[in-house]
Image (cartoon, rainbow, N blue to C red):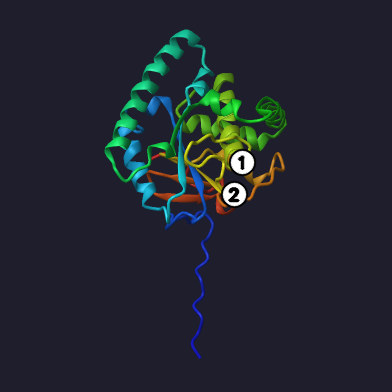
Amino acid sequence: MKKTEKKSVLGINEFYNINKFPSSEGMTVLGISIPLIDHKQSATKCFQSTEFLISKIKKSGVGAIISYSDGLYMNSDEPANKLKYKFQLLMEKHKQKYLKLIHQNINIIPSAFSFVTWSQLILSCKEFSNYSKKLKKIYSKDKLFQKYVDLDITTTNRVIDENSINYILEEVLLDYLIIMGRVRLQNDYIQDRQKWILNCYHGKPHRSHVYIYQKKIFNLKSDNIYKGSWYDLINKKLYEFDRLDIETFDFNQT
């Protein structure tokens, strides 16, 4: 009698690439950080990541949300009118270049791509303001949460102040609500039929994002297979939060 092979069990902080996406329809959400839009997350580099993700598709049925974090960077003392004009030019240029690359590839379905701003995503989430209020209240009492937020701020090379704290809390909250299915992802190709959602980014997640998932802060339920995951497009790894030890994992961006 042949011995059955035992499947290897991944350990804590041991992560690998995705082989293939599920065969069901799904959605990838690629967050674009405004400060990185001209280099680390240029349209050309993002499109190269898109082609890489396409290689993970078993069959057609995967849409892509390209999310610009313009509104997130309004957590600043800089005049809003100057930031708005600056961000608008950067986003328009990035989107136009991205669309040009999409249309040059005959194997890509243009309608599978949706380009949205930060504010659009917030408006697509029911009761975002209530969730934000609750999260800030939890943050004000949870010393460990405060520690992780401070470390996230330091990792992103920001000064620890009220603007930076609001920046991190807003970012991790929206990212969390997206993978928990509380944000409507409007896409002409998928049209709300997605069975899974995967957050993708050129870098690692924030400690505080992992923390609010592990602590089940809002006690939200979701059937999303990737609800506790983050895909790092630089290191080509899927970080699964259930196996990520915040205290020992290396969160430094590469």
Q: Quadrant of residue 234?
A: top left
| Horizontal and vertical percent position of residue 48 | 31, 41
Q: Are marks 1 and 2 in contact (CB under 8 Å)?
A: yes
Residue 244 position, x and y percent, is: 55, 50
Q: Residue furthest bottom?
A: 1
Mark found first going from the N terminus, 1 or 2: 1
Question: In the figure, is residue 116 to the left or right of 97?
Answer: right
Q: Nearer the viewer, residue 193 or 182?
A: 193
Relative to 69, 129 lies left or right: right
The residue that mark 1 highlights is 181
Q: CA distance from mark 1 to mark 2?
A: 8 Å
Callout 1: 10 Å neighbours few (<14), some, many (20+)?
many
Q: Which residue is mark 2?
A: 224
Q: Nearer the viewer, residue 45 or 14?
A: 45
- Along the line of sight, which residue is nearer the eye, 64 or 212? 64
What secondary structure is marked by label 2?
A: loop
Q: Position of residue 215 (x, y in %)?
A: 67, 44
Q: Quadrant location of the C terminus?
A: top left
Residue 252 shows up from this direction? no
